[in-house]
Amino acid sequence: MKNTQLYPFERNKYFYGKLLSVEDFNFEQKYMNDKRRLVNRLVHGIGVVCGLNVVRVDDLTISVESGLAFDTTGREIVVDMPVTKKLSMLSGYDTAISSGSDAYVYLCLEYSEGEKGSSHNIVPDGAGTNADRIREGYNLYLTSNEPEDSIDRTDMLFEDSVTVFRSGSIHIRHIMPRFVNPDTVFPFRVEIETFSKQFAALSYDIQLVCLNNAADGSSVIKVNFDETLLDKTGRYTLTFDLRTANVSNTEGTATPDPQTFRLAYDKSPAEGVVSGRSSVNITDKDVYEAFVDYSYDHSMDTELRNTVGQRLYLARIGLVNSVGSSIIDNIENVPFGQYVASNMLLNAIGRSRYAYGAEKGQPAVAAPSEAQLAGGKPTEIASGVCRINLNAGSLKNRVFYSDEIFHGLGLGSVTILLAAVTDSGTIYGNPSVFRDDEAPYEVAAKLDPSKGSFIIGILTKSTLIQDYIDVKWTALRDVDEKIAERSSMKITIKPNSLIIKPRETKYLEAVCSNMTNKTVRWSVSPATGGEIDSNGMYTAPNTEGVYEVIAQSAVYPEVKASIMVVVRG
C-alpha cells in the first residue's frame, strides 16, 4: 500500500528447473500492478472515473454512491456499494471541525488494502497460519485543508489559477489563460467565494506588466466587490478584458497590491493580506499548439513527483453550527474538478457535437452568419414578410395590427427590424427619405419575450387607397446574449431535502428565477422511487431508500434542479 515507486520495470525470467520463492511471486504481482498503475496515472489521469456522488441523507449523515477513481499513483479505488456514514463517525472529523472553518469541510477518498482470511503454513518453522489474501479497499476521511493551486486537473493545462486570498469566510482567485498571442484581448477572471452569512465587501488594485486594461489602456485593474448589491449566491465572477503588449516569448503578469486591499463584513473592517502573482505566456505560436506542447514538456519524473501526496476531494460539505454541533447545509461534489474522462465519453462528446451541433436543434455544420463573416459576434437570425390588410383603403391616422408572429428564436429578448416592401424596393427606416412627400405610414413592433412572438402595427400618415401593406421583418438575437441569459436561469426546489415514510405524500415547490416561462416537468430517479404529479405532489414508494426528485424546465431542458428524498419507516 505504501509503494509509490513504480519503476524501473523488471520481470521474472522463467526457465525449466527454476526454484520459485515467495519473493518471485510477489515480484510478479508488483510488475503487473506497477505497469497498469503507471498507464492509469499518465494516460488517464487523477480523479473520479464514474459514480462516487455524495448526497445528504439527513442533517448529520451523508451517503457515497458506488464508483471508481484513480489516485495520484494510478491505483484503482473501487467503492463497490453505497456507503452511508454520519459525519462524526468519519476519520478526521474532530480535527477538521476544530482546526478548520465552521463553514465547510472536505470529504476525501484514499486507497487502502488489508489482509484477509487465513491459510495454514506447512513450513515447520512457520507461524502456523498466515493471511490468505490481500483485499484492496478505501478510506473516507474529512479534512479542513485546502488543496494547493497546483492540484492536478485538466483545466490547469490551459489556465493559470492563483489563490490570492484565503480565509474561513472568503476565497479570492485570479484566473487567466496560460497562452495568448501578442496584441490580443483576453478575459481575466476574479473569482470570489464567500462562506459566511455576513455580506462581504472588498477592493484592491492589480498591477499589470506587459498587459493593459483594455477598457482604458491603463496598467492597473481596480477590483470593487460588494455582496450587498447582488443576490447572495456565495460564488461570483468579475471579468476584466486585458490586452497583451505587442511582444513575444514574454510573460505578462497581474499582481495584487497589498497596500490597497480593503475587506469588510457587514460594513465592519476585517484584517487580511492579499498576495500572489498570475501570469500568461505571450507567444507567437498558435495558442492550442502552445498548450499541447506545454502538456508534453514535463518529464515523467516531474509529472509524478508533483502529484504525490495530493488528496482526492470527493465533496465540499457546507456546515451550519446548531446547539454546539455542526449540521450539513449543502454538498458540492468534486469541488476541484478532479474527473477522469473516459475515451468513450470523449468520443461521445465529439460525435454529439458533429451530429447535433453545439446546441440541440442546430445543424451539425452551421453556415456562418454575416456577423461572423465580418468578424463580429455570432448572431441568430429569422425573417419573414407579413401582409397587413387595410380593409380596401384607409383614412389618415388609422392604426392596423398584424396577427401574432412567432419569430422562432425562442423566449427572451430579441431585436426586431422592420422594412416596408414597395414597388420600388424594400425600405428600412423612414420612407420619406427616398421621396419628396410625407411618408404614407409608420411601422412598429411590440415584442412579447415570454411567448417568443411579436405584433406589427401600422399608423397611416395620409389617406391610402391600397388594400394591404407588406412589411418585411427580421429578428436578431446575439448568441452571447442568449448564453448569458440562460446562464442566469435557475430552479430551486423547496424543501431542499426530504425525509418521509413509505407511501407518504409531500408537496414540492419549484421556484424559477430569471425565467419568463416557469413551467417545469417533474420526474423521479430511479423510476421505482415513487410518483410525482405535474403540480409537485410527491408520493413515496413502498420500498425504503434514497431517491432523486428532479424539476426540469419545460422550455429550457438544460435548466434543472434535484433533491434527494430519503424514504424510511
Image (cartoon, rainbow, N blue to C red):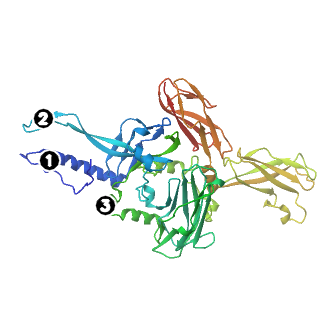
- Front-lying residue, 312 or 50: 312
Against 10, is 224 above or below?
below
For disc 2, the neighbor class at 10 Å (few under 14, some 14 to 19, many from 20) is few
- Of callouts 1 and 2, the N-terminal one: 1
Give the numbered dot on residue 425.
none
**Disc 2 vs disc 3: which is toward the camera?**
2
- Front-lying residue, 431 or 569: 569
Name the kind of residue labelled 1 in the image. Answer: Asp
Q: Is residue 58 left or right of residue 217?
A: left
Q: How far across and how far down the image is residue 367, in percent?
A: 59, 56
Q: Residue at x 54, y 54 (%)?
A: 193
Residue matched to label 3? 300
Against 392, is 120 above or below?
above
Q: How far across and how far down the image is residue 170, in percent?
A: 53, 55
Residue matched to label 2? 128
Q: Secondary structure at mark 2?
A: loop
Q: CA distance from mark 3 to mark 1?
A: 28 Å
